[in-house]
Image (tube, rainbow, N blue to C red):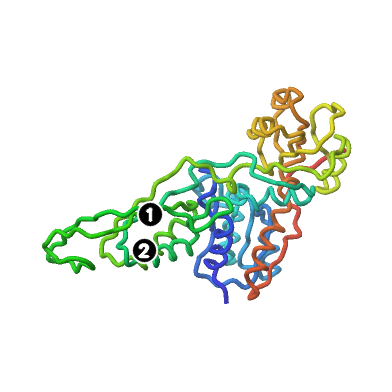
Amino acid sequence: MTKISEIIGVLEKFASSSFSESYDNTGLLVGNLNNEVSSVLITIDVTEQVVYEAIKTNSNLIIAHHPIIFKSLKKLTGKTEVERVVMLAIKNDIAIYAGHTNFDNIIDGVNSKICKKLNLENCKILTPKENTILKLVVFVPETHLEKLQDAVFSAGAGHIGNYDKTSFNTEGIGTFRGNENTNPFLGKKGIQSFEKEIRFETIFPANIENAVISAILKIHPYEEIAYDIIPLKSTNNNIGTGIIGELQNEISEIELLSLVKTKFNTKCIKHTNLKNKKIKKIAVCGGSCSFAIKSAILQNADAFITSDVKYHEFFDIENSLFLLDIGHFESEQYTKELFYEILTENFSTFAVNLSKINTNPINYYC
């Protein structure tokens, strides 16, 4: 049997919780990490109907995109739907996990699904995030340099673009003196030692920090290991807000509207004025991403597809691009497919079900 912790481990290896926004509540919201999973139900939102569907399908783990617990819960009396959902889940021993902005902020995540539905090519992150790259500096005796390098690189460090196993190594002299309670690998206790060491430097994404440190601790021969983890301002081109890509051929604004309406099964699309411009370069951002409009303009996008754009933000466009607001649920609906693919590719010991409940709270009269 597979434990909930194992499933979350796979999900967060794909989209680390460290990539979540500060306001978010990603992760296991209800349940015990050590519980074994009989079946999983995948949804965009967790409602009472969805929990009853989990009960019906014998699913004891719900994986959702939107966290049911977003603000702090001070009471559990059943007066609100959030309280009722949590109470119902606990009563039926159903765990709830949310993979939210961490799945929004990766190149192969939520926005990648939008790009694939539109057949966009040459896709890249619209606004790469800063402070997601860390630098490792560790001092190691010459005899253990190669083993340490192999361990750290195997943990995922040392990647720069299309290059791997990148590092910088500097020879130097390390000094130390151990007291009577030590058992030094080099030198003798109570006597100051001067030993040849290598300063080994490399970089790694923030989400694998624990794996990198574990690799060092496993291989390094010293009792006390000198190492630094330094945050860098370098941007990570695989992490950030939105994606921008290109259509193979230019299309008209009307053709784009028709394409989006079909691919995302939208009943209504809010958009800026038609200017009879050809569309080829398209920026996308699932969910509420009006804050990324300026980035789309700066990258010369012909169109930007997102949701939850406010009235006055349509004015801010100033005809710089063709803006489409396709609806929050509509823009993120294919996240269920993303979760399904990750789970079925990595596990075969439990059933994975896509929720049949339409959790979109917005209705249209057209």
**Direction front: furthest residue:** 171
**Residue 14: percent from the left, percent from the top?**
59, 58
Picture quarter with the N terminus: bottom right
Task: Name the one closer to the observer, 110 or 246.
Answer: 246
**Residue 24: percent from the left, percent from the top?**
54, 46
Say if mark 2 contacts mark 1, CB within 8 Å.
yes
Residue at the disc numbered 1: 169
In the displayed structure image, the side of residue 7 where residue 43 appears, left or right: right
Residue at the disc numbered 2: 145
366 over 176 or under it: above or below: above
- What's under tag 1, amino acid-wise? Asn
324 over 177 or under it: above or below: above
* Circle 2 SS class: helix
Task: Name the one closer to the observer, 35 or 202.
Answer: 202
Question: Which image quadrant is residue 27 in?
Answer: bottom right
Question: Which image quadrant is residue 326 in?
Answer: top right
